[in-house]
Image: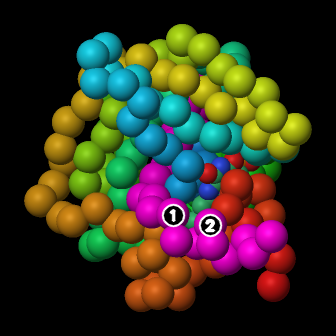
Amino acid sequence: MNKNAFRQLSYGVYVVSTWDKGRATGCTANSAMQITSEPATIAVSINHDNYTNQCIQDTGKFAVSILGENSDPGIIGTFGFKSGRDSNKFNEVKQELRECMPVVADACAYAVCEVVDKMETSTHTVFLGKVLDADILSADDPMTYAYYHKVIKGKSPKNAPTYIAE
Ligand SMILES: Cc1cc2nc3c(=O)[nH]c(=O)nc-3n(C[C@H](O)[C@H](O)[C@H](O)COP(=O)(O)O)c2cc1C
């Protein structure tokens, strides 16, 4: 199997956020997609070892902040290469509250979701979220996963579903 074929799938770059006992937390994710239009539902795939997974299970809600091409790329590093277990990521990244959920202020759009179902795989939980609120935050173009790799020259760590060992 040539896993490089998966690199031809298109994604965006997102921060999936939630609450950790009253403290905002979350992780970078490329795996978010709209599943249905009415009611609007979105699915995200979050590694079992990511602290965000446990916090979404406890909170029953998550927000997806859609990063733009002009969003600070440092946000991807803060949320994608550190764990909320041992750092307060939103200390470094400005947040806004939408529908009582933390979203990244420097994003181009967001959706706030309530978990309505989930599916376990061997490594990731796929959370299905009913959208409670969504809006545009800026006129910036959304960042694609290809842009992240080609222009920002970013990498994806082992817990990303798209990880391919070097
Ligand atoms: C570009 C990028 C995409 C990522 N995509 C995902 C993803 O879709 N699902 C996932 O579980 N982790 C993904 N990750 C990895 C998590 O963001 C990373 O493991 C993070 O440190 C987990 O933080 P936490 O322990 O606070 O939840 C991605 C990371 C990067 C940089």
> Which residue sits at x=42%, y=30%?
35
Q: 162 or 64: nearer the eye?
A: 162
Q: Which quadrant does the C terminus fall into?
A: bottom right
- Across the whole image, how many numbered discs are drawn on residues? 2
Say if 69 sits above or below 158 in the image: below
Residue 112, relative to residue 8: is it above or below?
Answer: above
Q: Residue at x 80, y 34 (%)?
A: 121
User: Observer-nearest residue: 144 or 9?
Assistant: 9
- Residue 65 magenta: no
Q: Is residue 41 left or right of residue 27?
A: left
Looking at the rendered structure, the secondary structure element under dot 2 is helix
Label drawn at residue 1: none
Residue range in magenta is 1-25
Q: Which residue is mark 1?
A: 9
In the image, residue 127 lies at what x, y percent? 61, 27
Mark 2 touches mark 1? (CB < 8 Å): yes
- Secondary structure of the residue carrying numbered label 1: loop
Q: Quadrant of ligand 1?
A: bottom right
Instruction: For the N terminus, give its image quadrant.
Output: bottom right
Residue 6 tag number: 2
